[in-house]
Image (cartoon, rainbow, N blue to C red):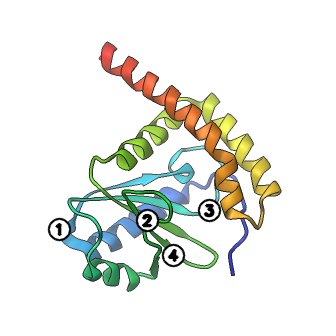
Amino acid sequence: MEDSIQVVDYDANWSIQFEQEKSQILNALGDAVLDIQHIGSTSVPGLAAKPIIDILVGVEKLPPSPTYIKALETLGYVYQGEAGIPGRHFFRKGMPRTHHLHLVKLGNEVWENQLLFRDFLQHHPDKAKQYEALKRKLAVQFRLDREGYVQAKAPLIEQMLSDARAWSKQCEASG
């Protein structure tokens, strides 16, 4: 049974929930974790979001070993494979979902895009509000269709990623 999509107002506890989960993941995976970041809408202060904490875990090698998969399963995660995104191994936790864990090679394209999108939204409140408005609309339209929801957001995300790349280059040039 798939859980429904709900977009809720920003909750300052999301950053606390991330830190708590980060600690558990670091304890479970140890030195395999090179970096761990809070991503997705719950990482953007003030932005409404699905109340699911997205966690980006950077490692040296993929795919994850059975030992790492087992360690994450003990924390309640369910391994989903690449789930349609090459270079990312996806784990979900809870039903309804509470956490998404994206295991990637540190510095790969998925890693870079996730951090760039987060940073862009954090520095551009107008774009964050535009994204929020679309998410709220789509959450009603695709309440029980997670795949449809994700696909309907994709064009705006791609446009914002393009804007974010230009912004990043501008920041590099001026700084």
x 28%, y 69%: residue: 26
Q: Which numbered dot is residue 111?
A: none
Residue 82, numbered circle: 2
Task: Look at the numbered disc 2 and give the secondary structure of its residue.
Answer: loop
Q: Which mark is residue 51?
A: 3
Q: Do residues under tags 2 and 1 come within 8 Å of each other at their CB atoms? A: no
> What is the secondary structure assignment of the residue under circle 3?
loop
Amino acid type shown at disc 1 = Asp
Residue sitting farthest toward the top: 174
Do residues under tags 4 and 3 come within 8 Å of each other at their CB atoms? no
Q: Residue pushed farthest left? A: 31
| Foreground label between 3 and 1 | 1
Which mark sits nearer the N-terminus, 2 or 4?
Answer: 2
Going by the numbered disc 3, the residue's amino acid type is Pro
Q: Which mark is residue 93?
A: 4
The quadrant holding residue 105 is bottom left
Q: CA distance from mark 3 to mark 2?
A: 22 Å
At a point 61% along the width and 55% down the height, the residue shown is: 11
Residue 7 appears in the figure? no
> Residue drawn at (43%, 71%), measured in percent from left and top?
81
User: Residue at 62% across / 31% down in the picture?
Assistant: 127
